[in-house]
Image (tube, rainbow, N blue to C red):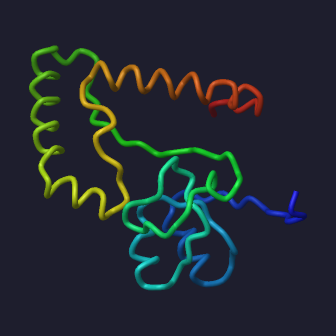
Amino acid sequence: TAGIEFTAVPYKGSTSSFVDIVGGRVDLVFAGVDVASFFRAGKMFGVATTGNVRWGAFPDLSTFSENGLPVVSTVWYSLLAHAATPPEAIAKLSDAFDVVLRQPASVKQLETNGFITGRVRSPRDLAAFIQSEVNLWRPVIQKATIKLN
């Protein structure tokens, strides 16, 4: 170990953690893509990213893995619909979003804001991805005895 002690401070949202780090009340935060404007303004400095690849918006920000810590944890967003939605509607929505997300302007905008696109392209792919995330995190949750409130 590096002999560094940390105190976890729970926040209800990222905004209050950003206020505290910019105000000097905390030293570090784990944050998502919503910190980009703070980086650009020089109000925050990136130490490393938890992703398995460098962040497109800040290519000089290395990953934890590159720094010798085998940490990979990502945040993902998906378009979800009610389980009773007709398959034809799901297919139509999926196809429409796929068209939009393949457009160069969309890809550029998303990547500029720190998103990595193109990993999941269909409802079947998404179901498989979600199951892989469940399989990845289930043992961690069980070992930490995390329970839902």
Give the percent coordinates (x, y) of residue 39: 46, 77
As drawn, 103 above or below 37? above
Instruction: Residue at 61%, 76% (x, y): give it.
Output: 20
Instruction: Residue at 17%, 22% (x, y): give it.
Output: 90
Q: Is residue 17 left or right of residue 142?
A: left
- In front: 121, or 52? 52
Q: Please state, as top left, top right, bottom left or bottom right, where the N terminus lies in the image.
A: bottom right
Give the quadrant of residue 89.
top left
Q: Is residue 127 left or right of residue 69?
A: left
As drawn, 22 above or below 130? below
- In front: 126, or 8? 126
Give the percent coordinates (x, y) of residue 16: 54, 69
Give the quadrant of residue 41.
bottom left
Report the number of discs: 0
- In front: 90, or 64? 64
Instruction: Residue at 44%, 26% (x, y): give it.
Output: 130
Q: Is residue 121 left or right of residue 55?
A: left
Give the percent coordinates (x, y) of residue 18: 53, 72
Q: Is residue 79 left or right of residue 24?
A: left
Q: Please state, as top left, top right, bottom left or bottom right, where the C terminus lies in the image.
A: top right
Give the percent coordinates (x, y) of residue 107: 21, 53
